[in-house]
Image (cartoon, rainbow, N blue to C red):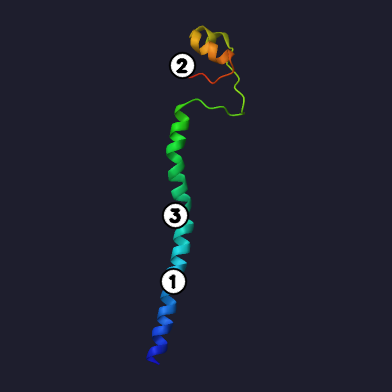
């Protein structure tokens, strides 16, 4: 009887460890991925990005008035401007 109890307790402990590991991986898995991507997301937001795959320059007259020649050259070349 004592040996059977030890076996049942051992199986119950192994099952609870396995279940806890699966639950922990399910909860912490997406957190680890989001933590890894948040630093790259911060780096991505620091530089201008294209939303539709093609860059469309702002040709508004008020915007063009305060724009540098280097920025305008980048826009005319179809590049995302990196200079102010």
Secondary structure of residue under mark 1: helix
Tell me if 43 is positioned left or right of 52 in this view.
left
**Which residue bears the numbered disc 3?**
28
- Name the residue at 50% across, 25% down: 48
**Which residue bears the numbered disc 1?**
16
Pinpoint residue 6: horizontal percent, then vertical percent: 39, 84
Relative to 39, residue 76 above or below = above
Separation (CA) of disc 3 from disc 1: 18 Å
Secondary structure of residue under mark 3: helix
The quarter of the rendered structure image containing the C terminus is top left
Disc 1 crowd rating (10 Å Cα; few below 14, some 14-19, many 20+) is few
Q: Quadrant of residue 56?
A: top right
Pinpoint residue 27: horizontal percent, then vertical percent: 46, 56
The quarter of the rendered structure image containing the N terminus is bottom left
First along the sequence among labels 2 and 1: 1
Q: Mark 2 touching mark 1, by CB under 8 A?
A: no
Disc 3 crowd rating (10 Å Cα; few below 14, some 14-19, many 20+) is few
Pinpoint residue 44: horizontal percent, then vertical percent: 47, 31
Q: Residue furthest bottom?
A: 1
Separation (CA) of disc 3 from disc 2: 40 Å
Q: Which mark is residue 83?
A: 2
Tell us which disc is closer to us: 3 or 2.
Answer: 2
Separation (CA) of disc 2 from disc 1: 57 Å
- Name the residue at 54% across, 15% down: 74
């Amino acid at each position: 009887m004592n040996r059977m109890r030890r076996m049942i307790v051992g199986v119950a402990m192994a099952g609870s460890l396995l279940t806890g590991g699966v639950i922990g991986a399910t909860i912490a898995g997406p957190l680890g991925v989001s933590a890894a991507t948040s630093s790259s997301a911060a780096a991505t937001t620091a530089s201008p990005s294209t939303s539709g795959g093609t860059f469309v320059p702002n040709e508004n007259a008020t915007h063009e008035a305060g724009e540098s020649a280097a920025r305008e050259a980048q826009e005319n070349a179809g590049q995302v401007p990196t200079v102010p």
